[in-house]
Every structure is written in structure tokens, then in C-alpha cells.
Image (cartoon, grey):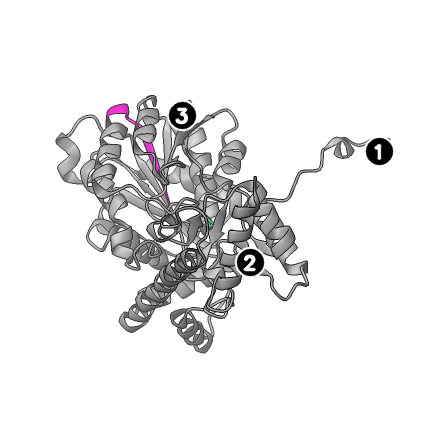
Amino acid sequence: MSGSILGDLPVLPLAESFALTAAYKTDSSPNKVNLGQGVYRDKWCQPWVLPSVRAAEELLHKERVNHEYLAIQGDESFNQKARELLFDSRISQQKNIRTVQTIAGTGANYLAASFCARHIRPKKVFISNPTWDNHYEIWKTAGPEITQQLYPYYNSNERCLDFGGMVKELEKGEENDVVVLHPCAHNPTGHDPTRDQWKSIAEVIARRRLFVVFDSAYQGFASGDPDADAWAIRHFYSIFFSDVSVSQKPLPAGMIVCQSFSKNFGLYGERIGALHLVSPPSVSTQGAFTHLTQLARAQISCPSLFGARIVNTILSDNSLRQTWEQDVKTMALRIRDVRSALRSELERIETKGDWSHIERQIGMFSYTGLSRQQVEMLKNQYHIYMLGNGRMSMSGLNEENVAYVAQAIKDVVECEP
Ligand SMILES: Cc1ncc(COP(=O)(O)O)c(C=O)c1O
């Protein structure tokens, strides 16, 4: 008997993507392939520091910056640049958008969930099924009293978006229930709504008066163009929250956009992100913003400096910004190339089944359709690591390993009864 309540706590499993990375690191096989963690890898399957980020680091080093605390809401210049990247320079000037710098996308999601739990008070939060698994944890921790209502997102037979199922579920929402949406490069399925489908989703959201939380973690990864990837967010702003929308009734009570710079700037461990709070045009954000910053103060006191300095330096300088835009294209295009390489190889060796979805999907991941059992076999027999739901992080593939991975997939697919 330990005599302490601590001893009664059961041991929990490590979050899957972290457990996979740890297992991959200790695997001594020369053939091992890491398709688990959602991080970009270059053509040698190594971490890639973006050239724009390297250049910004060197500039900052020369400036001999200090290490003072930031304000609770973060660096205003960074916040402005982050807003412009997401909303464009015209919308980002509007008074009804307020920004708080956060600890990456996760911190933005956590702050959003705690703010909603306390001040929006939804009965339900609608979360896509499937989704980034931390969405469930974050909402469970920040809003334990809120029911998590999973909306269908993926049609596994047709391997496409389950648009009908999604909209039907959202129709069950009530005023101020929250809906969490991925604006582009949906994790894990790689399927996004079309622009017409976004318009229909917006129409349901307005009618049911849902509160919108966009989680933007992959801006640039869907198309290679950060502006195109922000289309859904800008569309929601223009129809709900711009001056033009005042006459349109009903409208959602508000919107939060969570923004991560982990993937599109390759700043994973620097933990840099932002949260943007948007209110209808006639509604002041002042009070709500003070409540948001009060929560941020309790959670982190104030955000971190280095990532904000890097992003701000890049987005404030025309030439660095162009380099960054090229860097994003480089990542998006390499992922597109390995998609077609994997599909071609699977088809060349006549693997049973249809593999066209690998190329139809977009963003960092492929939702392969492999079963949990097949994924286990890939890990145990072939040293190939990916999430149990069959999600593969595509940039773990390269010219060297793609044939090996395709052959292993063929083996596991065809060995099953
Ligand atoms: C959909 C989604 N949101 C948020 C995040 C959080 O990213 P980070 O906290 O590293 O910025 C991720 C990371 O994988 C993600 O896939």
C-alpha cells in the first residue's frame, strides 16, 4: 500500500504518434521507414530547416536581440503578420479580429476550447470523425462538461468526403454549439470540402447559429499556395463578419481561428502559433478579448519569443517572404511527387485494390485504407511505422524506400484471408 492517492492512478498509454516515434528510434533495422509523425522530411528523409528560416535566424543572430518577456497577447508585429497571412492584408485590418500569440496550434486549440467552455457555454462541440486525435483530448480537458458530437467526415467505401453525413449531423446543432473545422489539408484523411461544399456548410452553420472554430495547421500544404488554402476562412469572414454581412440574418455568434506555424515554417519544436477571435461587425471584441487574455495569462503568462521573431522577420521582408513561399511550394510539390511514386509502384507490381486515392488526397498525409492489423504487420515484419488508422505521413518516403514500402504493402494486403 503506497498510502498515497498517486498510487491509485492507472498507467495511461503514450499518445500514439509519440509512441511510434520512440519505437522507430530504437528500431535497429537498416530498412526502417518512419511514416508516423506529422513532420516534413526532405528527399533524404531528414528534417528540413527552410532556407527562409535559416536566413531569418542569421539576421536575428546579428541583431543581438534581448530576452525580455512579451506582452500577454504576444508580439503585436508578429500578430499582425500572422493575421495577414490568414485573412489577407485587407481583412486583417478590420477591428473585429483580435489576435493572441499562442504556444503553437495546440496552445491555440486549448485556449479556444477553454474560452468556449467558459464564455460560449456550448452543450456540444462537433468534431470531425476522424480528426487529429488531440482534438478529443483538448476538448475533454478544457471542457469536460461539453458533449463531443462526432460528425461523419470520411466515406471509407468511396474514399471521399462524407459531405451528406457531415451536413446532416451539423443540422442537429443548437445555438452556440461549437463546430471544429479543418480549413485545408484535413488531418488525417487528406480530403477537403470543395468551395461549393464550404458554402453549404456555412449556410447550415448560420442557420443553426453555431460558433465556428477553424483549426489551421497546414496552410500552404494543400495546394502549395497559402492564399488558396485560406479560402474557406476568408469566405466565412466575408459572409458572416464583414460589413456586408450585417443585413444577413441569422449569423454565428463568432469565430475563432487557430493558426499553427509548426508545419508551414518547419518550426515544430519552437511552438509558435496564434489565435484569432472574430466577432460580428456590430459587436465589440473588447470584453471578449480581455477574457481571452486572462485565460492565456493563467495558462502560459505570456508566449515565447524565438518562433515569433523568425516568422515576423520572414513575413516583414519581401525577399524572405518570397523565399518562404518557394519553400512551401517545395514541400507541397515533393509530397505530391511521392504520392504519385507510391501509387505508380503499387500499380506496377499489381497490388490488389485501387490505389488512386493516394494521389487524390492532399496535404501531408495519405489515409491509406490499410487495416490496423495490416499496419501492425508493416511495423513488426517490415519496420514500417504509421498510425494504426492507416494514416501515412508521405514525406517519410523517398526514391530509396518507395519500392520497399510498396512491396511490403502488397505483401500485407495480399497475405490476408
Ligand atoms: C489538425 C491539427 N491541428 C493542430 C495541430 C497542432 O500542431 P502544433 O501544436 O505542433 O502547432 C496539428 C498537429 O499535428 C494538427 O494536425
Q: Judge whether 22 appears above or below 160 on screen.
A: below
Q: Judge whether 143 appears above or below 308 on screen.
A: above
Circle 2 residue: 34
Circle 3 residue: 122
Q: Is residue 321 visible?
A: yes
- Given contact means CB atoms under 8 Å apart, are the residues at marks 2 and 3 in contact? no
Q: Name the amino acid type tagged 1.
A: Ser
- For image coordinates 24% across by 37% down, the residue present is 197
| Earlier-in-chain disc, 2 versus 3 | 2
Q: x, y (%) of residue 106? A: 48, 46
Tag in front: 2 or 1: 2
How far apart are the two marked residues, 2 and 1, measured between alpha carbons? 40 Å
Q: Does residue 254 belong to the magenta stretch?
A: no
Residue numbers of the magenta segment: 207-215
Q: Judging from the image, what secondary structure is the residue with disc 3 in?
A: loop
Q: Name the amino acid type tagged 3.
A: Pro
Q: Which of the 4 image quadrants contains residue 245? A: top left
Q: Which mark is residue 241?
A: none
How far apart are the two marked residues, 2 and 3, measured between alpha carbons? 39 Å
Q: Does residue 210 belong to the magenta stretch?
A: yes
Farthest-out residue, right: 1
